[in-house]
Amino acid sequence: MDSINSKTPSPELDEIDLQIIAALRQDGRMPFAQIAEQLNVSPGMIRMRYSRLVETGVLKVMAISDPLLMGYNTMALIGIRADGSQLMETAEKIAALEEVVYLIITSGSYDIIAEVICRDQAHLLQFLTERLYQIEGVRESETFMHLKIVKEVYF
């Protein structure tokens, strides 16, 4: 399981690196030549920088789908309290569930917070009762249904 603490330190990023990342955040398919023109540098420089950013793990290029347009109309955050002696094992089992799209181990009221996507409320109920609550180490949970996404940023 990836965690912020297990990542190796990233290389020093300069202004051009940051601008390449910003351009690709706007349009992940933007041609290197167009980025180079915007930054007043050569396309070869953009290609080299892009390769380094990907190789070092600073940049990851992927398709992002809209769950609502794919038929997943119910999204929720679930705060989970787990047995401390089984925390990591419990988190890994929850992370393996298909409906879970984001999972973090936290401090505070909940040990684990998971974001899930489901087709509808019946699917969410089935997920909770037949999958999540069956995992050894899950003591209790609280579900927070998404009513409206006001801001969503992929950094």
Image (tube, helix red, strand yellow):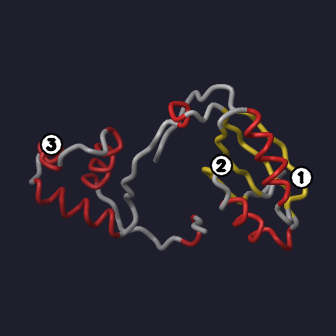
Q: How far apart, in angstroms, are the residues tagged by discs 2 and 3?
A: 38 Å
Q: How far apart, in angstroms, are the residues tagged by discs 3 and 1?
A: 51 Å
Q: Is residue 153 above or below residue 112?
A: above
Which disc is residue 75 wearing? none
Q: Which residue is mark 3?
A: 34
Of labels 2 and 1, the one closer to you: 2
Q: Which residue is mark 2?
A: 99
Mark 2: amino acid: Glu
Secondary structure found at label 3: helix
Q: How far apart, in angstroms, are the residues tagged by discs 2 and 1?
A: 18 Å
Q: Earlier in the sequence, mark 3 or mark 1?
A: 3
Locate the N terminus by quadrant.
Answer: bottom right
Residue drawn 12% across the image and 47% down it: 33
**Where residue 116 sits: x, y (%)?**
67, 45
Within 10 Å of the Cα at label 1, are there few (<14), some (14-19), or many (20+) other Cα atoms?
Answer: few
Within 10 Å of the Cα at label 2, are there few (<14), some (14-19), or many (20+) other Cα atoms?
Answer: many
* Camera-side residue of 77 and 151: 77
**Where residue 110 sits: x, y (%)?**
81, 53
Mark 3: amino acid: Gln
Secondary structure found at label 1: strand
Q: Is residue 149 left or right of residue 141?
A: left
Of labels 3 and 1, the one closer to you: 1
Residue drawn 80% across the image and 47% down it: 128
Within 10 Å of the Cα at label 3, are there few (<14), some (14-19), or many (20+) other Cα atoms?
Answer: some
Q: Earlier in the sequence, mark 2 or mark 3?
A: 3
Residue drawn 51% across the image and 70% down it: 7
Which disc is residue 140 wearing? 1
Secondary structure found at label 2: loop
